[in-house]
Image (tube, rainbow, N blue to C red):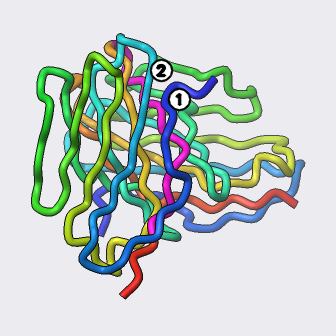
Amino acid sequence: DTEVTQTPKHLVMGMTNKKSLKCEQHMGHRAMYWYKQKAKKPPELMFVYSYEKLSINESVPSRFSPECPNSSLLNLHLHALQPEDSALYLCASSQDDGLSPQHFGDGTRLSIL
Amino acid sequence: QQQVKQSPQSLIVQKGGISIINCAYENTAFDYFPWYQQFPGKGPALLIAIRPDVSEKKEGRFTISFNKSAKQFSLHIMDSQPGDSATYFCAVRKGTGNQFYFGTGTSLTVIP
């Protein structure tokens, strides 16, 4: 079982809907990440939070809005998504020491109708 | 812009054989080089990682070889098993900011 929990596992939404993806970890990690992964492609970094502050935004469209309410939780708010946003969204966490690996959740499979 | 180039795209190996996957990078600011294994429907899981001050690291059947001057690193899977059939990604970490970039992936199939 993964130590990073993502909910929901699957999500289908229309282009006008607003939904949120959630990620939770209890390993005491202070860096948390969102990645997007299309089929048969590598994960692409979207956002990085360090000590609950957004430290990296890889030029992600504003229809994706991240939030880190506390050190254990990471959300990704979705609004007015496009069909090309359909993908697997992965959350990861790590110690923020430059030495430690990332631990990934199993992702949320998102489909935009 | 692809930060790290990975080859081959796919690999078929007989059970008991050695699987070798290669990655190359250009940016000398990268300071951490992990390998991940991903099964369908799952997130990537760390296999093994190396820092540039070490030329080789071995954990069980998995070995990373690192050539700093050539800016290349490779994953060797010894005694490959059908359960090793998965997609493997190399990754690099930029020295500051926790920016990780993944290679394009290698689909490994181990034939019984």
Q: Residue at x 49, y 41 (%)?
A: B6
Residue B3 lies in the magenta stretch: no
Q: Amino acid at mark 1?
A: Phe
Choose between B76 and A64: the one closer to the eye.
B76
Residue A53, relative to residue B78: is it above or below? above
Position of residue A18 in the picture relative to residue A53 (left or right): right
The quarter of the displayed image where residue A112 is located: bottom right
Marked residue chain, label 1: A
Q: Would you say the residues marked 1 and 2 are in contact, meaning their CB atoms lie under 8 Å apart? A: yes
User: What is the distance, in whole Å, between disc 1 and disc 2 at their CAs?
Assistant: 7 Å
Residue at figure coordinates x 43%, y 48% from the top left: B89
Image quadrant for the C terminus of chain B? bottom left
Crowding at dot 2, Cα within 10 Å, few <14 / some 14-19 / many 20+, comes out as: some
Residue at horizontal 26 percent and vertical 20 percent from the top: B68
Q: Position of residue B67 (x, y in %)?
A: 25, 26
Pick whichever, B59 or A81, lies toward us.
Answer: B59
| Residue underneath mark 2 | A54
Give the magenta part as a residue range: B96-108
Q: Residue at x 29, y 48 (%)?
A: B75
Element under disc 2: strand
Q: How many marks?
A: 2
Residue A58 percent location from the top left of the image? 60, 22
| Chain letter, disc 2 residue | A
Write down the residue under mark 1.
A47
Q: Nearer the viewer, residue A59 or B5?
A: B5
